Image (cartoon, helix red, strand yellow):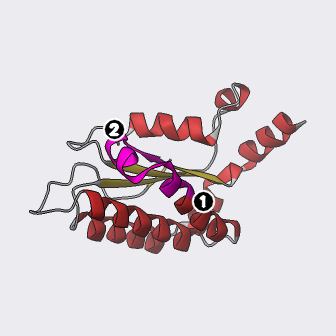
Amino acid sequence: MQFFNRLLRHLFATNYFTKKHFTQLTLQRIEAAIAQSEITHSGQIRFIVETSLSPLALYHRQSARERALEIFSLFRVWDTADNNGVLIYLLMADHDFEIIADRNIHLRAGGDYWVSVCKEIEVLLKNQEFEKGVLLGIERIHQVLRAHFPAEVITPNELPDLPLII
């Protein structure tokens, strides 16, 4: 029964719903927050929101975490000079999100830090305050990246700041 409920939720999820919460103005604010953050550290932040998963992914019971790891790889968030890329991934149909941090920043921040950040964001997302939740996530990621990878000079932008809706 749970599989069929999830399947229906994903089949009937539309980009309209996603774009209703992530308007052009919201995406611009998120992009600006990422760009501003990356001036002060050498880390890279990526935000990707996905409306729904494919029926095949659902058949294989792919979780939001598994999909986030796949997205982390597909969009090469792991491919930064200092191994300090961080992905915020939001799966709208499941009302779920994940933060995937590359090994160097994950090692320095620790698992407990990411759990605490997720708890803060989760409160806002449950109240459908998507923009606030994402901006809070960017701020928390900014804080840890700035603490561990401060920019002594302007570093190249290795990943696009533009949020993606896929």
Mark 1, residues whose alpha carbon is within 10 Å: few (<14), some, or many (≥20)?
some
Q: CA distance from mark 2 to mark 1?
A: 23 Å
Q: Where in the figure is residue 119, as x and y percent of width and height?
A: 61, 62
- Please state if 139 lies on the left or on the right of 104 as rendered: right
Residue 140 vertical position relative to residue 48 in the rendered view, above or below: below
Identify which residue is drawn at 64% across, 34% down. Answer: 54
Residue 105 located within the stretch drawn in magenta? yes
Q: Quickly name the residue at label 2.
A: 76
Identify which residue is drawn at 75% across, 48% down. Answer: 12
Identify which residue is drawn at 57% across, 35% down. Answer: 66
Residue 27: assigned label: none
For the stretch drawn in magenta, the main secondary structure is: helix
- Please state if 56 lies on the left or on the right of 48 as rendered: right
Q: How many numbered callouts?
A: 2
Q: Secondary structure at mark 2?
A: loop
Residue 18: assigned label: 1
Q: Which comes before the other along the chain, label 2 or label 1?
A: 1
Amino acid type, mark 2 = Arg
Q: Where in the figure is residue 31, as x and y percent of width and height?
A: 36, 66
Which segment is the magenta one? 100-115
132 and 7: which is toward the camera: 132
Q: Where in the figure is residue 37, as x and y percent of width and height?
A: 29, 68
